Image (cartoon, rainbow, N blue to C red):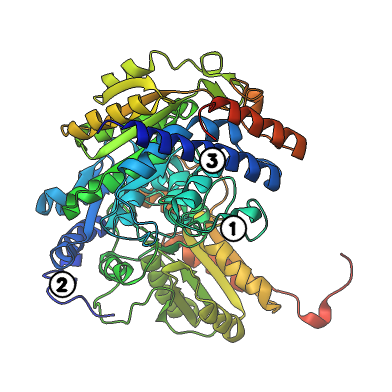
Amino acid sequence: MSPVGGLTWTVYDADKMTQAETYGLILSELGKMNPKIVGLSADLAKSTKIGKFGEKFPDRFFNLGIAEQNMFGVAAGLAKAGLLPFVSTFSVFASMRAVEFLRTDVCYQNLNVKIIATHGGTSFGSAGTTHHSIEDLSIIRAIPNIQLIVPADAVETALAVQACVEVEGPVYIRIGRSFEPRVYQTDQYGFQIGKSVEMKSGTDVTVIACGAVVYHAVEAANILEREDGISIRVLNMHTIKPIDREAILKALSETRRIVTFEDHNVIGGLGSAVSEVIAESGKACAFTKVGIPDQFTPHGYPEDLMHYYKIDTDGIVEKVRELLGKEFEKEEDWEDEY
Amino acid sequence: MPLSEQEHKELRTIAKKIRKDIVDVTHWSGGSHIGGSLSMVDFMVVLYWKYMRIDPKNPSWEERDRLVLSKGHGGVGHAVILANRGYFDFELLKEFNQFGSAFGMHLDSKKATGVEASTGSMGHGLSQALGMALGARVLKKDWKIYAVVGDGECNEGSIWESAMAANHYKTGNLIGFLDRNHMMIDGPTESVMSLEPLDKKWEAFGWFTQVINGHDMHQICNAIDRALAYKEGPSMIICDTVKGKGVDFMENNPAWHYGGLNAELAEKAKLSIDKMYPDLP
């Protein structure tokens, strides 16, 4: 989709703005065009940047204090009144502290509430484990009616925020805290919810990533192509739900090797969503999911955590090399030992 | 405004019928949250028949007042009230609790006509009502938002989150009813989790708080009038009620939080309800 007319934001701003800053700006712009948009936060207006909207539209912004449960209930009530609430808090609180309110008040009633959850994954690294959100994708994905998007960079955040206004019903957009390197040089790449983006074509192996990991996946693919002569397909699976089955099945048939990378527990997130499609296809495939191996994460800077969990450029290079060395049984070799 | 004797009699006649209908639906459906449904009948009848600006034939009318049953387990009582008020055919409640029915213990706002919010999990409805009250402010509407809260429900932290926020935003269009029936699933509220002094708590949270006999329709009307006249912030009307009101073997017995009635018990229950209204046919 192309940007909504009247936006003053351009892709060049992505160089100097984080995902959250871009979101705050875009929401303020959208607020001018759509008087139904209201904003809510729980004492994180500044951190999540929804405060930018609040400064422009003080009568349409409600800070609910440090009370996330009530915030989601209030959002449901505002949506029932006919408004379009945007709710922002840290992902760890949106997906866990308040999840039953999100599930029962917003999703069960299929209300038009948009959740922009910041500080996703380990992006708030040095804040420590309490502020790392490594379960959110799994939790949100299991709730009916809601769509789940993890934009790769500020450009994609801008597009996702605009796109979510166009769909009816709850949408959860998980973004980072800062330091998200820019992936896109243009916003004219046909962003569409539920449709992954092929960042690079290739035939030997497919790397599927989401969020800030996409940048590293592209970098790693370039290194592997140059140094190992491997042809790597890179998919930016920005929408975790509904997952782009078609692109996964195509990658499965054409490359037969798939590896997923995500800033999330390997249980329940992107890797799980992709593996479900693969398993149901009935086709054999060499597959690995890389992320946080079902453990609580240590404190540290985000880049150190990404390195530790092998979801940065070096880690992706290493893991893809590992997968390429991994053989998978051909059907004729299957034995009945199980 | 105060009730005339004629009005009072009419509303009590409706309340009597509703109590008996609740008994019938409980009998058909195999079981319901009958105790907390019977306790809230009187103020719900006053609201739906005297005060609320509603059009049951046009349930999504934008200018309507809204009522959120935060104590969502009163679903059977609410469904019977909505049917009697003309939102849908009472016959539909013959399928209450059945597979595929629009009606079950905790009502679904997407399926049950007239239900403003899906509730059932405690401590959610007041937040949704607050959202509607704030929505009215943004949209410049004069809707009144009524929220019916359970006393046991006040154990939930989220109730106090909403209470704090409603005072902060001075939602004069939000009026709460607290069905103070003194009983929870596991026993009397004060033995499970002390609530008193409950009126002082609401006052301390900035709500204009009144305590009334929740079965006296004159007191209910007076309290609503005062709450409607108070525009500076949210109001809470603590209705002192009896769980299972009208059915002698259920009254004040926490065992009747949820229960089923066979034909014999249902008849006994209805005879008891007749005794509550000796002046009515």
At label 1, the amino acid type is: Leu
In front here: B69 or A148? B69
- Are labels 1 and 2 assigned to the same chain? no
Q: Marks 1 and 3: in contact by CB < 8 Å?
A: no
Chain under disc 1? B
From the image, tell me which residue sits under label 3: B17
Give amino acid for label 2. Thr
Q: Mark 2 falls within which chain?
A: A
Residue B140 shown left or right of residue B256 in the figure: left
Disc 3 is attached to a residue of which chain? Answer: B
Q: Secondary structure at mark 2?
A: loop
- The answer for how far apart the CA atoms under marks 1 and 2 are is 56 Å
Q: Where, by quadrant of the figure, is residue A328 drawn?
A: bottom right
Quadrant assignment for the C terminus of chain B: top right
Q: Residues within 10 Å of mark 3 (few under 14, many from 20)?
A: some
Disc 3 and disc 1: Cα gap in Å? 17 Å
- Point out which mark residue B92 bears: 1
- Residue at 87 percent across and 73 percent down: it is A335
Front position in the image: A106 or A30: A106
Q: Position of residue B203 (x, y in %)?
A: 27, 20
In the image, taking residue B59 as reference, residue B172 lies left or right, namely: left
Q: Are marks 3 and 2 on the same chain?
A: no
**Residue A276 to residue B131: above or below:** below
Q: Quadrant of the N terminus of chain B?
A: top left
At which x and y percent is residue B114?
43, 54
B78 or B56, which is in the foreground?
Answer: B56
Nearer to us: label 1 or label 2: 1
Residues at marks 3 and 1 on the same chain: yes
State the residue position of label 2. A10
**Image location (x, y in percent) of residue A80:** 34, 55
